Image (cartoon, grey):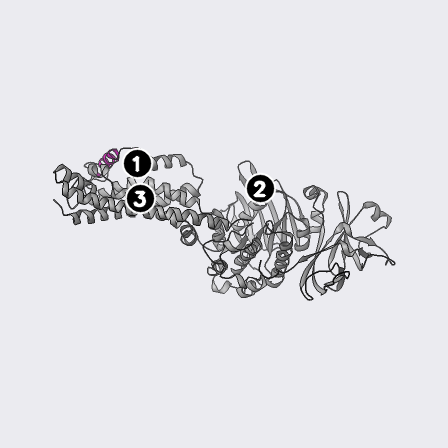
Amino acid sequence: MIFPESTGPGRDTNGVFRFSFTRTQGDFSLEVAGDFGPGITALFGPSGSGKTTLLNCLAGLLKPDDGEIVLYGRDLYRGSPNMFVPPEKRRIGLVFQDGALFPHMSVSGNIMYGRARTPEADRLVDVDHVVELLGLRPLMDRSPGSLSGGERQRVAIARALAMSPRLLLLDEPMASLDARLRGVVLSYLRRVHDDLGIPMIYVSHSISEVLALADDALVLSRGRVVASGRPSRVLLDPVVGGMFRGDPVENLLDGTVVEQGGTGQSGRVRVGEIEIVTPPMDRPTGAPVIVALGAEEIILATEKPSGLSARNVIAGSITDLDLVVDGVYATVDIGVRILVALTQGAVDALSLERGQDAYLVFKTSSIKLLEAEPRGEG
Amino acid sequence: MSSDLTIVLLSLRVATVAMLIALPIGFGLSWLLVRKQIRGRFLIEAVVSLPLALPPVVIGYGLLILLGNRGPFDGLAFTTFAASLASAIVALPLIVRTFVVALEGVDPRLELAARSLGAGPWRVLMTVTIPLAYRGLLAGVLIGSVRALSEFGATIVVAGNIPGRTQTVPLGIFTRIQAGDDQAALRLVVVSITLAVATLIVHDLLLRRGGLAGRRDRAGFGA
């Protein structure tokens, strides 16, 4: 955490950030409330559910009709008595869907735009560090028109971070990226959060992304909050379940290449304290990589199995069992938390419960590897 | 009879003051029309465009009622300022129309991004809106200036045709034709044509290059 806790009035919650407001536009009405800590909060919901409107209200680009928005104990908006802090005084970073970079400025001009308007004392984020972190050093003199989608997105994130925001809002920052770049931006965001400690609210359509990134989740539908809380619980909730049917749940794990592997030989990736056997890859040893593992692909055993063809057998303990529409999701802690999809029948047969030890079994071929770092230019 | 130089310089002075009046108003109105969902939008558009549809003489007469004897601004008629005001009003619709097109080409999300990055409305205008729209804005300034320089009908009614005070190039030409001094009239005609052609060429160049740049800029936002 780089921002001091406020001592002002309104700090009667555990949260860094809380809001409760309404806004009506035409025949769409948004009526939301939330209270979040310093982590990453995912905003989830079908298109048209009001996610972008909510972000715009938080950033001050739209004005609610009534209610309140409080950040670090400071009122940003209050319906009565009426008070409204304009967006330029909020220091809330906003990353638009396609970046919205200034086309008449260079990459470095874009990045420094907000920085130049941040008071000296508030410049808590080291721009060089952000530029390095996001791999933008070679792009600084380029014009936004010449960048790829992923590069534009990273510049937009750097631009918002360079002004040392108190809160970072990301509106589907990965919507325009291909699968390879998703991994890259995902790992950047996580690193940015870990290194800089800036709370984030993140709009996403992908449950796997949310599970990989977020500490909290808020689910919107037709302008109302339908669920909020821990992502694995909230997103697997039967009420929410219908929204992402068809989106397979994947565990996305940050790892480092231990062994590349090659023809006929598996690779190995270290994730936290454990090593996972993976398909061979063309990433060098020591390179960061994201391991994607479908929740449906994992077998859960209560005793250590032997004589298996599957190469990965990893010990852990069950921390949660969440009921969903067509089964149960078990959260298993193996140093990192892994979601495993089970049927109710299996849970009953094994009489699984929280706190119990378990082994995860999965085949090498069920693992997909996503790059966590761009390969040079492009 | 005034010298050619006196007439040309006065014309430039009248047009400059006219632009100083019309440009801020024109920009403000265009910005309102493009960026704000205001009530009475149609009314503003109609009133601003009216001088395009009306005979300039009618504009001049309206101004004469306002600025003349017993009018609310008594004493301003038949002054250099009255000539500028007449020019400003006839130039305004052309300025607003060009500015509206220029501002519509600026993605409003860029302005919102700038606000979220700590720039107040004024700074957003100076660092994002105007730099991105400047070709179209410059075209509006030029087309407005050309119109102001060629103003005749409204000016002669509200400002008269006073040498050295309100006698601009078009009025000077008129006077010299009336006096049968064709050669003197032709000299001013040449000045007039030169000014107009030069401005229109620059205007055309700006719009053509603006169009290309506009496409390049948009390519920059593509997914």
**Residue A77 image point, x, y percent:** 52, 49
Please tell me how crowded label 2 is: few (under 14), some (14-19), or many (20+) other residues with Cα within 10 Å: many
**Residue B15 image point, x, y percent:** 25, 46
- The residue shown at (70%, 43%) is A246
Q: Main secondary structure of the magenta part?
A: helix
Q: Secondary structure at mark 3?
A: helix
Circle 1 residue: B51
Residue type marked 2: Leu
- Magenta region: which residues? B51-67
- The residue shown at (26%, 42%) is B87
In the rendered view, tell whether residue B14 sits above or below residue A315: above
Left or right of A126 on screen, residue B160:
left
Circle 3 residue: B144
Circle 2 residue: A30
**Residue A220 image point, x, y percent:** 63, 44
| Magenta highlight on residue B107 | no
Distance of mark 1 from mark 3, alpha carbons? 13 Å
Q: Where, quadrant-wise, is the N terminus of chain A in this rendering?
A: bottom right
Distance of mark 3 from mark 2, alpha carbons? 45 Å
* Chain at numbered mark 2: A
Please tell me how crowded label 1 is: few (under 14), some (14-19), or many (20+) other residues with Cα within 10 Å: some
**Residue B213 image point, x, y percent:** 43, 50
Q: Earlier in the sequence, mark 1 or mark 3?
A: 1
